[in-house]
Image (cartoon, grey):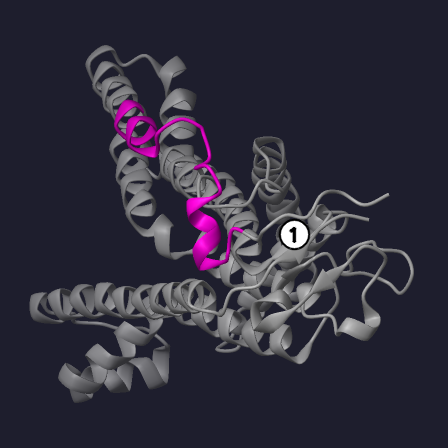
Amino acid sequence: MHSRPAVSPDLPFARELTPPRSGPSWVRIFFGGLALWVATVVVTFVTGNANLVPTIILVGSFLVPVTFVTFAFRRADEVITAQRIFTAFVYGGVLGVLGASLLESALLTHMSSWGYLAIGAIEEGVKLAVLWLLARRLPWYGARDGMVLGAAVGFGFAAFESAGYAFNALFTSSGLSLLDLVETEALRAVLAPVGHGLWTALLGGVLFATAARTRPGHLGTGSLGTGHLGTDYLSSGHPGTGRPHLRPSRALLGWYAVVVLLHALWDASQTVAVWLTLILTGTPSQWLAIVRLGELRGVTQTQVHLFTGMSWGLLALDGLAGLALLLARWARLGRRPSSTVVRGY
């Protein structure tokens, strides 16, 4: 039995017909959560109550990821329900960090110059696998919905990973350091919008677009797509089944390579900054110490400032490149010719 004809919200004229998604405002979530986090930090510093440390870690690690997932949710189609977003966030976070930890410990016995690519390939592969698992039974696919669900998986991963980094920052050689914990959370919160959530959103958009671009002769029961956009937003599937079908493609493999490269360059930013600083300001004695001892000695304040600026500059360039790719993909989908799509099976 077929469901009633529906118009894809990705179509330009359909946005006026489709009511906006309801839900909490991401602005209220962010500023409300920020106020709670700051209050908890202040009270903990004043009272020295260690029982509040888990609250600082949880609120600080999850605030920005939850804010951005809420922002993205209101821009998705009705197939991406709040329950699916929550499931993607939690499962993507927990399964992602567990899978990445197991694979990295098994495959990366020692770190090398290729280690950054390996880490990027493992973590992006695990997140893509989790997204594939969670989205395999959706009734239809749209590229923008893939970006939103992918962002939920990626931001879930980022939230749980940040909680781990914050917890580790608490322990120092001189005892517990609440200041290090707070600094770590603040830094990762600033960087979170252009990290894991963005990378998995790119892959999710390509994965869903590939599923939707099934040729008309291969459409399942109840699937109909006409026009250029119709091939990018419809209920596709195995012949005669009408069930959606996620599948690998050259486009997905290519974008996976792009995302892995962005991830690797992000992780390697400090290493690259060190070498650039040495190339520009290194002394013969410093190069000799590196060659003979594998250590960098006699670092000057100028080199420290140059390293810091380059490190942040490389992160900014990497983040802006990823953001530009995501915005270009999102805008390109919105400019395609209109078409009516029948959903259901």
| Magenta stretch: includes residue 13 | yes
Report the residue at 53% width, 66% height from top: 120
Task: Give coordinates of residue 307: x percent, y percent.
Answer: 19, 69
Report the residue at 23% width, 24% height from top: 38
**Front in this rendered view, residue 232 or 37:** 232
Query: What secondary structure is marked by label 1?
Result: helix
Report the residue at 47% width, 69% height from top: 336
**Front in this rendered view, residue 231 or 6:** 6
Mark 1 Cα within 10 Å, few/some/many (few <14, many 20+)? Answer: many
Quarter of the view holding residue 65? top left
Residue 105, visible in the rendered structure:
no
Residue 115, visible in the rendered structure:
yes
Q: Amino acid at mark 1?
A: Leu
Task: Give coordinates of residue 6: x percent, y percent.
Answer: 63, 48
**Residue at the outermost right position:** 240
Task: Give coordinates of residue 319: x percent, y percent.
Answer: 33, 63
| Magenta stretch: includes residue 157 | no
Residue to which mark 1 is pinned: 131
Q: Quadrant of the N terminus?
A: top right
State how many labels appear.
1
**Front in this rendered view, residue 229 or 325:** 229
Task: Give coordinates of residue 323: x percent, y percent.
Answer: 35, 63
Position of 289 relative to 231 (above/below): below
What are the residue bounds of the magenta stretch?
9-32
In the image: residue 218, left or right of residue 299: right
